[in-house]
Amino acid sequence: MSEELKKFRTQIDSIDDDLLRLFNQRAQLAQQIGHAKNGSPVLRPEREAQVLQRMVEANKGPLSAQSVSTLFTEIMSHCRALEEPVSVAFLGPQGTFTEAAAFKRFGHAHAGVSCASIDDVFRKVESGEVRYGVVPVENSTEGAIGRTLDLLLQSPLKLCGEVLLAVHQCLLSQDKDLAKIKRVYSHPQSLGQCQDWLNTHMPHAERVSVASNAEAASLAAKEKHSAAIAGKQAAERFGIAMQAANIEDDPRNTTRFLVIGNQEVATSGKDKTSLVMSAPNRPGAVHDLLVPFAKHGVSMSKLESRPAKSGLWEYVFFVDIEGHQADSKVAAALQELKSAAAFVKILGSYPVSVI
C-alpha cells in the first residue's frame, strides 16, 4: 500500500471517529427532546422537513441532494427509534414500491406493517393499531389511484406527508431467453407503465394482472417460462434474476404516495394543502369554486374529478394547493370556498416532499 493511500485512509478513520461521536451526541439530544415533549407525538413532520430542506440547501457536494436527504432521513429515523419506533402500515407484501416509499420517508428504523390492500392500511391506522400509513395516490404515467381517493373522502384520517418515488421497473425471470417466456405477471399499473417495451420485446407473452409486483415476483420465481415486472428490491427479496432494467416507457415515471395518520401537522414554511369539494347544482358552480383561490393568490397544483357515491353523474373534486391551511391567504380562500361549495373537506396540510 502506498504512503499516499495510507494517509487518505488515516484521514477517513479520523473523520469516521468524529462522525460516530457526533451521531451519538445528536441521539442524546434527540432523547432529551423526547423527554421534554411530555407525551406529544414522537414524529414532527414539519420539523423533519425543515431539517432535510436545510441540509439539501447547504450541501455543496460531491454528494447529491438525494444522497444527503437519504443520509439525514436515516439519522433521524434511528434517533427517533431510541424514543419509540414509529409504526407504519404500507400496501404490501414486502418488496413493493409502497414499502420503498415508506423507507424513503421514515428510514429503516421504523416498524413496518405489511397490508394486503389499501383499505387495510386505512383500517389499521384508524383503529390505532399503527401510527401512520403509506398509500399510493397517483402515478405520472397511469394517473390517479381511485381507491385511495375514495377512502380519503370517507375516512377521518388526515394527510401528514407525501413521498415522491422514481419508479424504475425491471423484468425479472429465471429465463435469460425472453422468447421462451410465456407470461408476464405484474400489477395493472406497472403493466400499463411498460406496455410499449412489452410490445417491442415480448409481444408473444401473455400479460397477467396480479395484486402487487411482489406477488408477481414470487410467482415468476416459482414458475418456468414466467416473468414479472417489479422493482429491483423484489428481485433481491425473492431470489429471481433481473433480465432487463428500467423498462418503463417514461424514464421520468414517478409515483406519489401519501402519509395518513391522526396528526395535525404544523407549518414547515413550504407546505401543501389537500382538500376535496363538490359544486352545487347550478350554472357556473364549478367556476365559482375556483374563484377564491385566484382572488387570494393561492396556487393550485392539482384538480382531479372523481365520481361521487351520492348519485349518478355527480362528481367531487380533489384539489392540491400551495401553502398551509394556517397561512393567512390560504385560510381566507378556504373560508370563501366553504360559502361557494356544496361540500368541502380539508384532508390535511403537510410539508412538500423535499426530494
Image: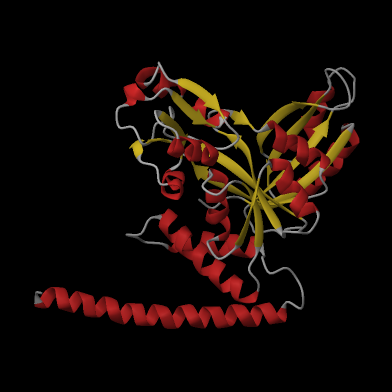
Q: Is residue 302 above or below residue 30?
A: above
Position of residue 108 measured from the top left corner of the image (x, y, whole percent): 53, 62
Q: Can residue 295 be seen in this view?
A: no
Residue positioned 38% across, 55% down in the render = 64
Residue positioned 57% across, 55% down in the render = 105
Q: Which of 123 and 287 is in front in this view?
A: 123
Position of residue 354 measured from the top left corner of the image (x, y, whole percent): 54, 53
Quarter of the figure with residue 241: top left
Q: Which of 314 and 331 is in front in this view?
A: 314
Q: Is residue 270 above or below residue 321?
A: below
Q: Is residue 156 visible?
A: yes
Left or right side of 276 for 175 = left
Quarter of the figure with residue 79: bottom right
| View extreme (left): residue | 2
- How many marks do you count on the picture? 0
Q: Is residue 141 above or below residue 203?
A: below
Residue positioned 87% across, 32% down in the render = 341
Protein image colouring: secondary structure
Q: In this view, does 26 lie above or below 78?
A: below
Left or right side of 173 for 39 = right
Position of residue 128 measured from the top left corner of the image (x, y, whole percent): 78, 59
Quarter of the figure with residue 118: top right
Q: Quadrant of the N terminus?
A: bottom left
Residue positioned 69% across, 58% down in the render = 267
Position of residue 209 measured from the top left corner of the image (x, y, whole percent): 56, 27
